[in-house]
Image (cartoon, helix red, strand yellow):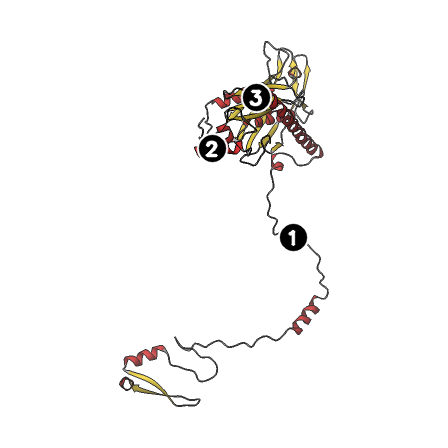
Amino acid sequence: MRETPLSNCERLFLLKAIESKKRLDGRQTYDYRSIKISFGTDYGCCSVNLGKTRVLAQVSCELVPPKDSRPTEGIIFLNLELSPMASPAFQTNRQSELLVTLNRQLERCLRNSRCIDTESLCVVSGEKVWQIRVDVHVLNHDGNLMDAASIAAISALCHFKRPDVAIQGRDVTVFGPAERDPVPLSIYHMPVCVSFAFFQQGTYLLVDPCEKEELIMDGLLVMAMNKHREICSIQSSGGIMLLKEQVLRCSKIASVKVSEITELINKALENDRQARKEGGKFGFVESMPKERITALKREESLVEMTDVQETADQIISKAAAGHEVVPSPVIVATGTGQVGEGLQNTWGLDEEDEEEESGTKVEKRGTGSKSEYACLPVSVFLH
C-alpha cells in the first residue's frame, strides 16, 4: 500500500484544528458524515455512502457440504477487496496490512457475533447446507472503511433472500423466484462498527475519521455493537494506552450511534420493501439524484384570443407616424458620393490621377446651379 504522506504544514493545521474542536468538513467531534443506503434490483445488493467513502456489498449463496465439526450448521464466508479504483494507494494482487485487518474485523463483527442463525441454513444434515458469501468492494476511499463495510454487509444480509428448497428422500429441489417466493435469512441482531480516532496520545477523540485524519492519528479503537448495547467485538490499534474511563466513554457514544444507524437501515429496508410491493421503481438508478435543467421550463397558461385583431388595429391607428427616411448617399465613382438634389458629379479618382499625370489641375468657376470647369496649368497655382 502506497500512502501519500501529509506535509508538515497540513499536519500542524489538522492538529491545531482538532485542539480547537474543529474539523475540515465542519462536523463536531462526535458527528458522523451523512449516510446513504440504497439497494439494487436483486436481493442482497447494497451500496452505502459514508460521506465520500463508498462501499458495495453483494450476498450470494450455494449448496455445499458442511464442515465435519458442524454438520448441521451453514457457512458464512466474508471477503473484502481493495482495488486501485477506490484509491491510488491500493495495489492489485497484493494483500496489504490494511486489507488483512479489515477482513478480520469484519469476521469478528458478523460471523463471531453469531448474528445469523446458521442452523436454519442446513438442508440435509451432514450432506448439504447453504453457504452465504458476502463480497464487499470498496469503490471510493475517504476514511473509515470499517464502519462503511459493516453497514453495507449487514444491510445486504438483511435484504438478501435465498431460494426455497424441497426435500424428498435424498433428492433436493431448489425452486426459482418464479416458482416459490425466496426465503429471507434469520438474523438475530445487527452489529455495526463505530470507529474512534485518538490524537496527542489519547488526549483528543474523534468519531468517524476521514482519510486525512487517519493519517495523523495516534491510535484507533473499533467497537462493534448492536442496538441492545451488547458489545460484539472491540479492537484497538496504534500502540496507545487507553484508560478504562476512555473505553467506557467510547461505549456510551457507540450505543447512541449504533441505535441511529440501525434505525436508518430499517427505514431503508422498509422503503425498498414498500416500493417492490407497490410495483414502483427501485434499484441504484432510482436512488441516484436526477439533475435536470428546469430553467427553461414554464407552465402553460390560457390566453384570451377573441379580440386580438381589433386590439392590434387600434394600437396601430393610435401610434405616431414614423420618422422621415433620409435617402442614403449614391456612390457614383470610387471615392465620391452625392447627397440631396443636384447634378451628378462625375469627377472620379481615376480622372484626377490622369490629369495630375498630364501636369494640369482642375479649377471650378461660376455660380448658380450650373458649374463650369476649366483646366489650368499647375504653374499658375504655384505662382
Q: Nearer the viewer, residue 333 or 259?
A: 259
> Which residue in the protein does label 2 denote?
12
Q: Nearer the viewer, mark 1 or mark 3?
A: 3
**Residue at 42%, 89% in the rendered image:** 370
x and y percentages locating residue 154 in the rendered image = 62, 24
**Residue at 54%, 76% in the rendered image:** 325
CA distance separating discs 1 and 3: 52 Å
> In the image, which disc is placed on residue 298?
1
**Element at label 1:** loop
Q: Nearer the viewer, mark 2 or mark 3?
A: 2
CA distance separating discs 2 and 3: 33 Å
**Element at label 2:** helix
Q: Is residue 249 visible?
A: yes
x and y percentages locating residue 168 in the rendered image = 69, 14
> In the image, which disc is placed on residue 208?
none
Q: Amino acid at mark 3?
A: Leu
Is disc 3 surrounded by few (<14), some (14 to 19) or many (20+) residues within 10 Å? many
> Which residue in the protein does label 3 denote?
106
**Residue at 49%, 23% in the rendered image:** 98
Q: Amino acid at mark 1?
A: Arg
Q: Is residue 84 left or right of residue 287?
A: left
Q: Earlier in the sequence, mark 2 or mark 3?
A: 2
Q: Earlier in the sequence, mark 1 or mark 3?
A: 3
Above or below, 111 relative to 351 = above
Report if the CB atoms under discs 1 and 2 are less than 8 Å apart. Answer: no
